[in-house]
Image (spheres, rainbow, N blue to C red):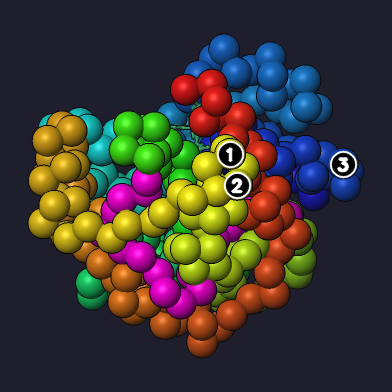
Amino acid sequence: MKIVVTGSLGHISKPLTIDLIKKGHSVTVISSNPKKQKNIKALGASAAIGSIADVQFLATTFTGADAIYCMEPPVNFFDPNLNLIEYYNQLGNNYKQAILQSGVKRVIHLSSIGAHTDKNNGILIFHFNVENIFRNLPDNVAIVFLRPVGFYYNLLGFIPTIKTRGLIATNYNAKYKEPWVSPIDIAAVAAEEITKNFEGKKIRYVASDELTSDEIASILGKAISKPDLKWTAISDEQQLNNLVAAGMNSQSAKGLVEMNAARHTGELFEDYYRNRPVLGKIKLTDFANEFAECYHQK
Ligand SMILES: NC(=O)c1ccc[n+]([C@@H]2O[C@H](COP(=O)([O-])OP(=O)(O)OC[C@H]3O[C@@H](n4cnc5c(N)ncnc54)[C@H](OP(=O)(O)O)[C@@H]3O)[C@@H](O)[C@H]2O)c1
């Protein structure tokens, strides 16, 4: 199959590309950085250098593909001029227009946990909006919406507080088992879905492990030789003040606090637990080694 992968050599797109090439597919990887061309070619893929903000570039690159993997890259939450909602709506509309223009009929769209609702999900509302833009594509465009849960790599954000205060402090503490995922497991699911014959529009949640916040603190603590590491919940207000004081854009800060508040109650995961997937192979204990390496480097 001829497959186009967006997301360059990112956390999901790189293992996805490697897997697809191993299975004999012809893969084109989109990157905005000409310097990545060499590394993309080294994997056995073709590089298409351009921006997903450019509809003509997308449409040309998608033309002739049997299937495409579409993702929206993360943004800089510290950009004071960022309007996250408008930015992602624009990207969603770019993809929609390019899919229509190119005539591609099979799409894997990387969405997220929280995309099932526009209520109390904070920044994740952008995934709800973008899913709906894709859902408006004609019936003959088959789409799988992948909804991964929180990525293990988010946990690296706790390293500075562990170093300065000896604890994890955020505005949630999951007493129930919260799902987490490795990008490697997401790539495996994306590779499986993209090469399948499917029709219509379907949703698939992706997760690797399910743990309480205390279990996470214990696993990460052991990995960094701090077996007493504790996970402490701070108030929403305190979290918001911390993020704003650190220079985060206020729309993004409010959105992150609201998202975490829905994790604290478990509301964010209600639809996940109704449509619970088989868990992937990479467990938090595997990621803990990478966490420890970063902890000791930083
Ligand atoms: N973190 C979580 O817990 C979580 C949970 C659920 C869903 N998600 C979603 O997962 C996605 C992130 O996936 P990931 O970690 O695989 O991404 P990633 O590793 O950050 O890779 C994204 C790549 O996209 C490329 N890119 C950026 N801007 C571009 C542009 N304008 N045009 C073309 N390419 C561009 C960049 O590579 P170049 O520099 O080479 O262009 C970048 O490395 C986001 O949509 C996020 O919302 C995250």
| Whole-percent x, y for residue 252 in the image | 20, 47
Q: Which residue is mark 3?
A: 22
In the image, residue 224 above or below residue 179: above
Q: Which residues are magenta?
A: 167-189
User: Residue 222, labelled with which disc?
Assistant: 2
How far separated are the C-alphas under marks 3 and 1?
38 Å
Q: Secondary structure at mark 2?
A: helix
Which amino acid, by three-letter code, is at mark 1? Answer: Ser
Q: Which residue is mark 1?
A: 225
Secondary structure beneath dot 3 equals: helix
Q: At 75% across and 59% down in the image, what residue appears?
A: 281
| Left or right: 295 as drawn, with respect to 116 | right
Identify the amino acid type marked 3.
Lys
The crowd level at tag 2 (other Cα within 10 Å; few <14, some 14-19, many 20+) is some
Q: Nearer the viewer, residue 118 or 106?
A: 118
190 inside magenta stretch: no
